[in-house]
Amino acid sequence: MTSRHWQRNVFILTFILPTLILYCLFMVYPIIQALYYSLFDWSGSSENKDFIGLKNFVDLMHDPIMWQAIGNDYFLVAGKMIGIMLLATFFAVSLTRFRLKFALFFRSIFFIPNIISVVVIGVLWAFIYNPQIGFLNSILSLITGTEVKTAWLGFPFHTIWMLLPPSIWAGIGFYMILLIAAIQGIPESYYEASSLEGAGQWHQFTHITLPLIWEQIKVSVLNIMMTTLNGSFVIVMIMTNGGPDNSTQVMGSYLYQMAFQQFHFGYGAAIGVVILIMSLITTVALQRIMRQETVEMN
Amino acid sequence: MGSIMGIRHPIIRIFFYLILGAWSITVLYPLLWTLLDALKDNKQFYANPPWALPDVPLLWSNFTYVWETYNFGKYFTNSLIVTLGSTVLGLVLSATTAYVLARYPFRGSNVLFLLYISSMMVPFSLALIPLFFLMNKLNLINTSIGLILVYATTLIAFGVFVLVGFFKTLPKELEEAAAIDGASYFGTFFRVMLPLSQPGLVTVAIVNILNIWNEYFVGLVLVNDPDHYTLPIGIAVMQAEMQYRTEWGPLFAGLFISIVPVLIMYIFFQRQIASGITAGAVK
């Protein structure tokens, strides 16, 4: 019996330890170190590493680019939430409740952008926006009959708007699949009962579908927020590299620029800490807001 | 009346088909012109609108050109090695831990589970600065092994999360029967549980393969030697160079080379990808 007990412990340790060691080395340790580095003025070499307390954060507060970047981050969060959720919900309902033909076919097609690298998507959309030979200007030239040469990614203001269509285009499929699974989990009898009472599609959507998939909508909204704050910088780096004149900078791309291009590693780490704080605060705030919504619904 | 039957009115049905058809085109058309534009030379890009069909003879040589001259052949191999290596390692790391957490809970196992899951909340870009220096110290910058180790670590959270749920659904009697038959803990895992958990493992593997194949940022930080670029880095570098030397056809050929493998995987494993999404999102 004791030998079985001993065997069990050996088994547990062999299965737990390798994962835990790698995870601590390449995940936990770097994260803790990043919090520590954020307190230093550090150019990467060990000689030039001065402890400066919270000065990086104070400097950040007075850094106009950081505020621009945070504004852009939340612009993308809000724009993607609205655009993706509206279209994903519309498609999910259309492909389940409306009993349309080819629903499975449409579903497979709509997911395709989600399997393509953001790098590829960024390059494709940069080509759509290309001033000389891009799709957008070519179509506009065709329609207006005059040659259009707009630099869609070069406006001094609001260029960040141009990054919204590719981000929404690329995001819909994932959330559509999530919502389709949720809608398919709703018992058919609910719809039968309400349709006996003469309820139409819209009534069923607001009174049955929406309340019963609210949990998945919440998960989707939180997920959009998190992936945007933690990952939207890739499309920014590919399409505009933060420009023109930092107007499309987001926190992630600013972190990369500060740390790995200008070698202010302490400042970069402080930006990373701010991203972490932003996503934690926003998670809590969104959960609050959406909990109230659920109460209102009942 | 009768909306259990879906939408009946023919005109409204046509309206919905039009919308769904239009969105299908916005999704599929970019893939089509990626291929078509990969077969053009620069002159065609500037003389004709982007939707014009490529001139005959088609410039298939753009593919060999980007494969050889722009080293996409090498990038492709690197991507393949790194993706498969980290997927396998990530699967081993998460399946073993998930099995113990699901079946042999011990004191602190809940804390361990939370420790893994919580990394899904933390922006990985935060960890990348120290990671860059750590990898430097370990001489793992510009190596496939380095990328594999880091990627595999980022896959643990999702793998553990999905597989703990999966192992919990398997009947306990199987392990008890195996134990009565005198099988060791390891034997039970490898001969009984692992074969049974194949659907869960495949789902996790497929989702991970897609993620790593497409990953850009970690690679950008940990690799700066062209010999070790993966495809997304190669594409980004090539696009940045377009400011100085424009070779649109080869660029599109490069994009297409990167899309084809995941597209083929998607065609075969659609169901697993969908179940991976739903399993991973139930937080």
Image (tube, rainbow, N blue to C red):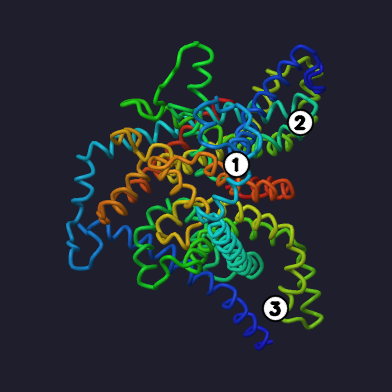
**Residue B185, disc:** 3
Instruction: Give the secondary structure at mark 2.
Output: helix
Q: Residue at x 68, y 85 (%)?
A: A4
Instruction: Give the secondary structure at mark 3.
Output: helix
Residue B239 at x, y = what percent? 45, 43
- Front tag of 3 and 2: 2
Count of numbered badges drawn on the protein: 3
Rounded to the nearest angstrom, the CA distance separating label 2 from label 1 is 18 Å
Q: How crowded is mark 3: few (under 14 residues within 10 Å), some or many (20 or more)?
A: some
Q: Nearer the viewer, residue A122 or A8?
A: A122
Q: Which chain carries label 2?
A: A
Q: How crowded is mark 1: few (under 14 residues within 10 Å), some or many (20 or more)?
A: some
Camera sees residue A229:
no
**Residue A114, disc:** 1
Residue occupying the far bottom of the picture = A3
**A45 is higher (above) or lower (below) than A135:** below
Q: Which residue is drawn at 69% across and 35% down?
A: A109
Q: Which of A127 and A269 is in front in this view?
A: A127
**Residue A103, disc:** 2
- Front tag of 2 and 1: 1
